[in-house]
Image (cartoon, rainbow, N blue to C red):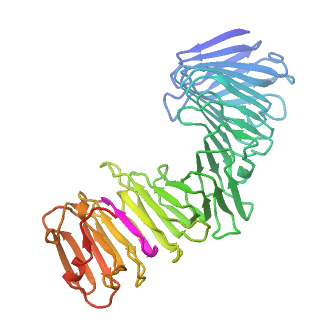
Amino acid sequence: MEVLTLEDFNNGQDLFLFDLQNNVRFEFEDFNTNQYGGNPGRAYIYFENDAVGADATLEISLYDSLLDYLNVYTYGPDDFFSELLVEANGGYNYMYLDLENALPSDDQLTRLVLTGDAYYMGFYDEDGEFNNLEDIDFSDFTGDYTYLNIYESTADFNFQGSSGSDYLDIDDGFDENDYVDGGDNGAEGDILEVEGNDVLDVTSNNVQNVEHLRLSGELSGGGDALLINTPGFDTITLEDETTDDSGPGGNNLVLSGFDEVIILDDQTGFIQILNPEVTITFDSSYDYEEIDVDTLDVSGVSAVTFIIPEGYSGYDVDINTLDLESGALDTNTLTFISPAGDGTEDSGDIYIDNFLYDPTDSLELVDMSNFHGFFYFNDEIGEGVDFLIGDLQDGSDSYLELVADDNSSSEFVFSGTQNDWYIYIEDFELDVGGSGADVLDLGLLGVDATTDINIDVSGNVATITANDGQFAGTIVIQSDEGAALTVADVESRIEFDGGL
């Protein structure tokens, strides 16, 4: 096959090749039609009648080439490409492919093969060109990253991944007859993205060697979708508003066997997680907006870690109901992590309006020692729960509510000495006859005696600050007793051990 080399084309203009008499191998080198961003150039290739024949192979080689639009025309009634062979080398490469011919539809490609060792190769579906693919073979590609978008799969396909990190994005049409093998693990693992209503067809029978699952779109079939992680994914990501109806029976999602759940958008329905331990990451970095979750049931998880990344203005998470008790396990530990802001980005914050807990098997520990945002728990969180409180966001106000008169003891260990935070604890027990009283442990704040702190009382509210700048924060407790507090009452509930 003849070779046609197109190189050093980076002026952002359109390229036209007319009247090609026979099929050739196209080699694009340093061909960048995207240099000027908002007005990228395009490459148009026109074949004469009967130039390629039926079921022809389109061969393309890319080297550091960005094809924002590669348009290939075949005019003969029996001229069309059914196979695309691409060799990608160098650094970053991608193509938006548009095939046009005299046939009723443009989706005649059934086979796609990728070779080479480029850092990145991306395939983007311009007009359904990849919808009819049956054989997708990236197994001989030794580069770092690949991406393939299929707008609407209409054929049963077999995907063989590369030795790098593959991202297979199926907008619609994934089903039980499709097969995906991610191949060897790349640096960040492989990703399979499917539409929400297709997710129940993702099982160990047709998916293997893929580390990450992403769901796009909304569930719309009605009832609870139970997704069991039989393929062994490391993570599942909810990219859009997957759920849309509160309570079992709506368009809700039950996730079983996932160690990490990543939520990128509002979830106005019900999400239940079943696993001994889980990490839930909320990340709205693509739009910097608050993430709202109606009902999150983690009662089938013993230990839950919430991660809220720092962001431009801090990412806020608002959970209407956090269920800790309806499942078989009951939750024992909640850990909240939000990295400290770096001056250009703020820490994330979390609001929880309602807690469901089991008084006979309550939560044991809330660990916020690495949480640097602020929190607002607008409901009783459980009986006898201990708290580890770190350096909350500078200038922030946090709030939590204990259970009044519960005859159980909660201990608070504070460790944040740098930021000027403020925390208000409601229904703090001071005098219930001994072991039921709550405890403030200030030993990690640079103080070791009550003479190092100021205690101001007003009615049943006490405010505690450092006497000589050992820590910058403010602790406010409201007693569940109706009578006015004394300084001695408060001092009796302060320790300096520095641990639970």
Residue 389: say if magenta: yes
Picture residue at 17% right of the left edge, 72% below the top: 450
- Residue 4: percent from left, percent from top: 66, 11
- Residue 89: percent from left, percent from top: 57, 19
Picture residue at 56% right of the left edge, 31% below the top: 186
> Which residue in the rendered view is the most extreme toward the right?
78
State the extent of the magenta-drawn residues as a range: 377-393
Q: Nearer the viewer, residue 142 or 126?
A: 142
- Residue 113: percent from left, percent from top: 71, 24
Q: Taking 248 as reference, is 198 above or below it?
A: above
Locate the C terminus by quadrant. Answer: bottom left
Q: Does residue 263 appear left or right of residue 393 in this picture?
A: right
Locate the N terminus by quadrant. Answer: top right
Residue 334: say if magenta: no
Picture residue at 64% right of the left edge, 61% below the top: 243
Tell me where residue 41 sits by quadrant.
top right
Q: Taking 189 as reference, is 410 above or below it?
A: below
Picture residue at 52% right of the left edge, 77% below the top: 360
Q: Does residue 17 appear left or right of residue 109 in this picture?
A: left
**Residue 397 visible within the image:** no
Q: Taking 153 as reference, is 384 above or below it?
A: below
Tell me where residue 400 sits by quadrant.
bottom left
Q: Nearer the viewer, residue 150 or 351?
A: 351
> Which residue in the rendered view is the most extreme toward the bottom?
483
Q: Nearer the viewer, residue 90 or 468?
A: 468
Q: Nearer the viewer, residue 371 or 324?
A: 324
